[in-house]
């Protein structure tokens, strides 16, 4: 029994042609024949028969087809021709009984004879191979998989036919080949090789004009249909025909050997729509040419970048530009380094050596021997070797020339730092302008001009990734009735974005998958889980939490992903400050893999770990700044890090909080969304250390609004109270004292309801602050006394110190500076024992004010200077402005007017930059007082009126009284 697929599917037994039945049965047989002797999974058969939308009965239908085929073949063999296995089926048939196997065997024999210098016998084998064909492969059958297989087989047929014709040209049969080549060129107008072979046959038949007309027709077709120029090989052939290059003449009649190919030209075609990349192009050319001119080592440049960024396009473009620099030829190979089956250097050297003229019979049998022969053949020649898509250094090293002037250009998703490279060029995303330009070149300039905003949006949704832009442009080019807005709308759905970026064999998902599948298990797991947190950037501690592994091990895995360009290193941080990000499209792919490969409980556990680690570090940073002050904590799980590691990460706690500010904001949002209310409000409250010191009021407001809503949804009254109290503190900073009081009183009531004395004391303490600023010192003193008693019972040293320094302010305002000094001495001792540098700075500032009231300006200057040192170390701009105002007052009292002016100008700038109106009013008050001391009452009055407006706007009556007193003095002096 014989099976034929090189034409319509056909099965014959002797002279009998069997009736195979309907198309489903034929497709099943076709797939089994293609893999004759090998297992074909049932799922692959279902895919071939039904495509992407199989019915529920698909598996049963395939079984029915197999049973029918078995019955059909039963009379023509000793047993079933189709064997069943647990995973699928296989067709048991001898290779010589399948026309495809006969074709492949004869074609391989033809290549061997060609390489052995026996062209006439090779032609006979090629003709025998081509005789197996009866028409287009699998003609009459349909389906996506069948069409793909048929296209591949037809491509193989065309390649063998061209090989045979090329050999016959070398045998001097050019006149006989013209009719066949003419038909072949017309049948395949976009294949350059038949056009070139026809040109050569015509030229050798003394038909130069006809040969040139074939070139012009071929060029016009390529430009009109594909928008590209002919390859360098076809262009060179046209030039040689024009100049009647003697090398194009027919070979001597007695010479039947193939000439050695001494000038290889293996580069793929340069693309016509190459866009941007001027700096990268210049850098690659500079590294290749400058190193070559130095003559010390083989120029070797590695071009690296993420999947789809255009590394191959850049390398091929540069290689074409440098053909004049490398006149002895260009070698090119796709090493497929990030696929499951990378190309073996042994196979690459076989191909390169054949191209360089080594017959198959002379090829060495070992890798080392082939590499030696390769280096010998390249020695002294200017050949550019392009090694595309290298997986690691091991693939590249055997393919390196031994000496200049040859050069090597490598592309890889890894940096290949182990190679003796002379240059490295990182290819990043296109900028916005060039991204739109590339889209315009592929989709059509007129369409992009008509919808410029949509074009920019589409480029953004493609992440400015060249492959994605090219796919999107191709989809638009093949759908002229679509608008750009339509494609933008489709791609805005993140769950379908990668589906939209798939067209004609080009696809983003496939590009990412190649790299992903080449990773180890831990790297794949971390890559998936990096899509879990909505963090803008991730650090090593987050990777450790996601993997549930020690920090060092997780950092190694994170760096593996960076080497593969699945994550990119963000910013200039190094060591523990290194941070990473996922490109938007890569993150979409990571989410797909996460959903497909990890159960929901594992995803939830990983998210809780990473949010718990964030909460732990944020709380530790707060503790480093405030000491062990009174706080109301949730029962949310923390993920502690080892003590020494925590100390290194938080060596500068305020700077760490600033770096992770976006992460904290995202963490609060995600914790609230995931139903972790306690974690959300605890994290938001812990971050107030940053928000207050660095005046990030928008973040303070947003995190607390989100966490407050989460607490209310969860019925968490303690969490609601914490958020209300902290929002009240925000309103105090904003000088919105009425709203602050309402929030704080609501918080105090909730704390009382849940029996939390410390929480209530914290709220009462801040209500007392509002009382004092509102001109109600007795109410303030009473509330401070209540809060102080609670903190003393709780043993909270820092909170006691904070209340005492507030009490001292009231004593100062009442004129009892000595009592204030004693109170502040106690507060300073408590805060130093409690370890809170921020409260210590506040106590020192109040102590400076007290010394001024006691007319001890030198002591006051010392206290203010100590406070300034603490706040500058903590990076607190408002605290710094306050301390400068105090220091200026001490300098004024000591008669150092210029130093006073410098401090106040600095304080005013800091207050304005921070948007703090209270501190701005204090600085203006100080400047007004300075102007009066200088005898400039008019200038003083102007500054003081500005201070008066600010103090009234924030409802600060005590400050307003001081401003009015000085303003009266200024007005009196002016009159």
Image: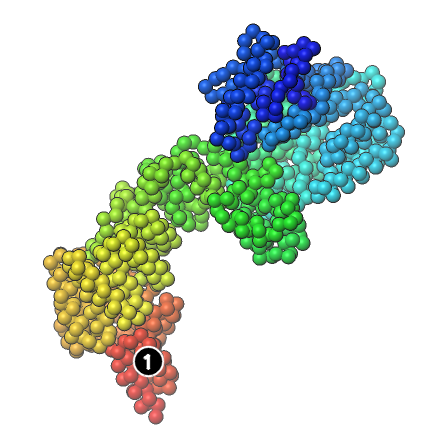
In this rendered view, identify the residue nearer to me: 128 or 850.
128
Q: Is residue 516 above or below residue 827?
A: above
Residue 575 visible (yes or no): no
Q: Is residue 902 left or right of residue 14?
A: left
Q: Is residue 333 left or right of residue 754?
A: right
In the rendered image, residue 947, in percent from the top left (x then y), is placed at 34, 78
Which quadrant holds residue 295? top right
Q: Residues within 10 Å of mark 1 (few under 14, many from 20)?
A: many
In the rendered image, residue 828, in percent from the top left (x then y), is placed at 18, 63
**Which residue is label 1 attached to?**
948
Q: Is residue 465 left or right of residue 752?
A: right
Q: Is residue 296 above or below residue 259?
A: below
In the rendered image, residue 119, in percent from the top left (x then y), is placed at 75, 17
Residue at 74% x, 42% y: name it.
223
Quadrant assignment for the N terminus: top right
Scheme by which the image is coloured: rainbow
Residue at 33% x, 76% y: name it.
953
Which quadrant holds residue 263? top right
Quadrant assignment for the C terminus: bottom left
Residue 783 visible (yes or no): yes
In this rendered view, identify the residue nearer to me: 974 or 157.
157
Q: Is residue 713 left or right of residue 241?
A: left
Residue at 40% x, 42% y: name it.
530
In this rendered view, identify the residue nearer to me: 92 or 663.
92
Furthest-right residue in this view: 206
Secondary structure under tag 1 reads helix
Q: Is residue 485 above or below residue 17?
A: below
In the rendered image, residue 202, in percent from the top left (x then y), is placed at 84, 29
Residue at 85% x, 24% y: name it.
175
């Amino acid at each position: 029994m014989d099976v034929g697929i090189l034409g319509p599917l056909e099965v014959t037994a002797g002279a009998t042609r069997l009736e195979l039945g309907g198309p489903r049965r034929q497709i099943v047989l076709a797939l089994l024949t293609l893999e004759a002797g090998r297992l074909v999974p049932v799922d692959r058969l279902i895919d071939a028969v039904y495509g992407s939308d199989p019915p529920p009965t698909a598996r049963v239908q395939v079984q029915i087809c197999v049973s029918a085929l078995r019955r059909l073949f039963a009379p023509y063999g000793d047993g079933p021709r189709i064997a069943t296995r647990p995973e699928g089926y296989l067709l048991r048939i001898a290779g010589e009984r399948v026309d495809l196997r006969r074709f492949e065997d004869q074609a391989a024999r033809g290549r061997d004879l060609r390489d052995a210098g026996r062209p006439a016998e090779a032609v006979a084998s090629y003709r025998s191979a081509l005789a197996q064909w009866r028409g287009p492969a699998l003609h009459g059958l349909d389906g996506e998989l069948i069409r793909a297989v048929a296209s591949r087989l037809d491509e193989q047929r065309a390649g063998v036919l061209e090989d045979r014709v090329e050999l016959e040209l070398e045998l001097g049969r050019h006149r006989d080949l013209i009719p066949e080549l003419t038909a072949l060129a017309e049948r395949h107008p976009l294949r350059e090789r038949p056009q070139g072979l026809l040109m050569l046959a015509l030229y050798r038949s003394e038909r130069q004009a006809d040969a040139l007309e074939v070139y012009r027709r071929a060029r016009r077709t390529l430009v009109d249909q594909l928008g590209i120029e002919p390859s360098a090989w076809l262009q060179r052939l046209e030039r040689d025909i024009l100049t009647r290059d003697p090398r194009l003449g027919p070979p001597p009649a007695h010479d039947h050997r193939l000439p050695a190919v001494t000038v290889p030209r293996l580069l793929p075609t340069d693309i016509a729509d190459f866009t941007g990349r001027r700096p990268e192009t210049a850098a690659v050319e500079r590294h290749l040419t400058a190193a070559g001119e130095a003559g010390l080592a083989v120029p070797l440049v590695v071009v690296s970048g993420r999947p789809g960024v255009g590394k191959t396009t850049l390398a091929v473009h540069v290689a074409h530009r440098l053909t004049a620099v490398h006149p002895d030829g260009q070698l090119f190979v796709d090493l497929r380094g990030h696929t499951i089956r990378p190309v073996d250097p042994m196979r690459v050297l076989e191909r390169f050596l054949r191209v360089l003229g080594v017959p198959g019979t002379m090829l060495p049998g070992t890798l080392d021997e082939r590499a030696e022969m390769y280096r010998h053949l390249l020695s002294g020649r200017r050949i550019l070797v392009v090694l595309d898509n290298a997986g690691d250094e091991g693939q590249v090293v055997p393919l390196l020339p031994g000496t200049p002037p040859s050069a090597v250009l490598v592309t890889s998703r890894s940096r290949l730092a182990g190679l003796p490279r002379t240059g490295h060029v990182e290819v990043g995303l296109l900028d916005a302008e060039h991204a739109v330009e590339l889209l315009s070149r592929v989709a059509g300039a007129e369409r992009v001009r008509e919808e410029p905003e949509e074009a920019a949006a589409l480029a953004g949704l493609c992440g400015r990734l060249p492959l994605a832009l090219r796919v999107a442009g191709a989809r638009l080019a093949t759908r002229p009735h679509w608008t750009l807005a339509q494609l933008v709308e489709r791609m805005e759905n993140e769950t379908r974005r990668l589906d939209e970026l798939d067209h004609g064999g080009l696809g983003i998902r496939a590009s990412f998958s190649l790299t992903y599948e080449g990773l180890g298990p831990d790297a794949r797991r971390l890559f998936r889980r990096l899509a879990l947190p909505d963090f803008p950037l991730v650090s090593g501690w987050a990777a450790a939490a996601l993997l549930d592994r020690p920090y060092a091990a997780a950092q190694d895995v994170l760096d593996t992903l960076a080497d593969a360009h699945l994550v990119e290193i963000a910013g200039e941080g190094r060591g523990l400050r290194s941070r990473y990000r996922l490109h938007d499209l890569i993150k979409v792919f990571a989410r797909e893999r996460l959903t497909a490969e990890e159960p929901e409980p594992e995803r939830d556990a990983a998210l809780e770990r990473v949010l718990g680690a964030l909460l732990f570090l944020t709380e530790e940073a707060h503790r480093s700044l405030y000491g062990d002050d009174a706080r109301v904590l949730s029962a949310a799980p923390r993920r502690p890090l080892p003590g020494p590691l925590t100390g290194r990460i938080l060596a500068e706690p305020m700077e760490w909080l600033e770096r992770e500010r976006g992460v904290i904001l995202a963490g609060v949002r995600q914790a609230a969304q995931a139903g972790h209310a306690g974690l959300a409000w605890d994290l938001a409250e812990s971050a107030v250390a940053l928000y207050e010191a660095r005046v990030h009021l928008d973040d303070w407001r947003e995190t607390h609004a989100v966490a407050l809503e989460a607490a209310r949804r969860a019925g968490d009254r303690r969490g609601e109270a914490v958020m209300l109290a902290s929002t009240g503190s925000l309103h105090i900073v904003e000088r919105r004292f009425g709203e602050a009081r309402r929030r704080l009183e609501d918080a105090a009531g909730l704390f009382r309801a849940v029996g939390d004395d410390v929480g209530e004391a914290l709220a009462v303490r801040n209500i007392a602050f509002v009382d004092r600023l509102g001109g109600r010192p007795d109410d303030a003193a009473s509330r401070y006394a209540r809060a102080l008693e609670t903190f003393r019972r709780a043993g909270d040293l820092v909170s006691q110190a904070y209340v005492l320094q507030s009490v001292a302010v009231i004593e100062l305002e009442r004129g009892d500076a000595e009592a204030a000094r004693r109170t502040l001495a106690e507060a300073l001792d408590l805060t130093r024992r409690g370890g809170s540098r921020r409260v210590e700075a506040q106590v020192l500032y109040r102590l400076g004010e007290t010394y001024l009231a006691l007319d001890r300006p030198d002591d006051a200057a010392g206290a203010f200077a100590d406070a300034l040192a603490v706040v500058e170390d903590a990076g607190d701009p408002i605290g710094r402005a306050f301390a400068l105002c105090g220091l200026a007052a001490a300098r004024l009292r000591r008669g150092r007017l210029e130093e006073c002016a410098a401090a106040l100008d600095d304080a005013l700038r800091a207050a304005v930059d921070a948007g703090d109106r209270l501190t701005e009013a204090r600085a203006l008050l100080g400047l007004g007082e300075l102007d009066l001391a200088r005898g400039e009452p008019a200038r003083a009055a102007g500054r003081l009126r500005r201070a008066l407006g600010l103090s009234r706007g924030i409802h600060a009556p005590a400050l307003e009284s001081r401003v009015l007193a000085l303003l009266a003095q200024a007005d009196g002096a002016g009159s």
